Amino acid sequence: MNFLKSICLILLSIFSQLTYSQEQRLYKNYFSNGLYNLNPAAAGYDGQFISQLSYVKNWTGITGSPGTQVLSNSIRMGEEEFYDPNMFLNRPLINLNNRVALGFTLYTETSGPLRHTGLLFAYAYHIPLHTMRLSFGLAGMLAYYNLNTSEFKPIDTNDLSLYTNTSAFIPDVNVGSLLYDPTFFLGFSANGFVNMNKIMDHTSRQPDFNLCGGYRFVINKKLKFEPSLFIMMEQEGTLFDLNGKLYIRDKGWLLLAYRSNGEVTPGFGIRIKNVYQLNYIYAITTGGLAGYNYGSHQISLRVNVTALVRQHQK
């Protein structure tokens, strides 16, 4: 399996050389929202019931800049029994098939006069492969777009084209796969199989393809380091993220990431009583908007519901 990991990482590194950078909109933040929103096969990836609430404000200082609120929930429907260090048997909270996992996300995003609200439901099936697992996922989405025309200040108030197609319901479908173990992951997903029509005057588009991978190295008893690479291929171009994450005594982490759109992203996470985790990420804009905003702020609260319930059961 170590040989398989090495081959996968080499292929991922070679593929990254084929990508190019282009300025475009910020895409889903997998550190704040949960990886399964980008790749549905990652639902249940943690093996437990995880709930996370996040708030993102992009380009602070610019009036009407995008803001996003996301509630993500991911649960493995069954767990394997195991003995803790005190030799107490831990039984699953939900005694169903350990291979099945679900994800549910509710989100809303505002950008100037445009509001985008949606639901995402993901299903993943995890197959054991010796010390690793291979999962396949399918996600359905339903989004509602609404354009608040009362915020318009047109020169020609009789221009009817400004007030047509101001709202729409848009369904979509994502698929993905993920190969992983406690120290390694490699995933591929394709997002947007349904939303390929002309809606609200947007031109037709093709699905987006995403590739991600990472490996967690043990430095010593206190420190672990995880480099990772995320690549998103869209119709408008290709972006990549190069991330470095340092875990400290499994009580928290420090992050430094670089995005090919010119952003530098430091961040940190603090774990509280092995149940809660508070994360903060600050994206520093280095492109054309750098002189007009104060960066993007992302804060999230992650709750391990499985661990929380077990604490109350003791």
Image (spheres, helix red, strand yellow):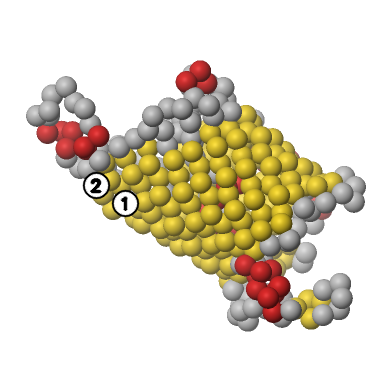
Q: Residues within 10 Å of mark 2 (few under 14, many from 20)?
A: some
Residue type for callout 2: Ser
Task: Classify the position of the C terminus by image quarter.
Answer: bottom right
Asked whether residue 300 appears in the rendered view, the answer is yes
Q: Position of residue 109 (x, y in %)?
A: 40, 45
- In the picture, the disc for residue 144 is 1
Amino acid identity at mark 1: Tyr
Expressed as whole percent of the image width and height from the top left, the position of residue 153 reads: 21, 27
Q: Residue at x 20, y 42 (%)?
A: 165
Q: Which residue is mark 2?
A: 167
Q: Is residue 5 in view from this perspective?
A: no
Question: Earlier along the polypeptide chain: callout 2 or callout 1?
Answer: 1
Q: Position of residue 116 (x, y in %)?
A: 35, 47
In this rendering, the answer to whether 98 lies above or below 47 is below
Q: Give the quadrant of residue 89.
A: bottom right
Indicate the secondary structure of the residue bearing disc 1.
Answer: strand
In the picture, measured across the screen, residue 116 lies left or right of residue 302, that is left
Q: Which mark is residue 36?
A: none
Disc 2 to disc 1: CB gap under 8 Å: yes
Q: Residue at x 44, y 40 (%)?
A: 67
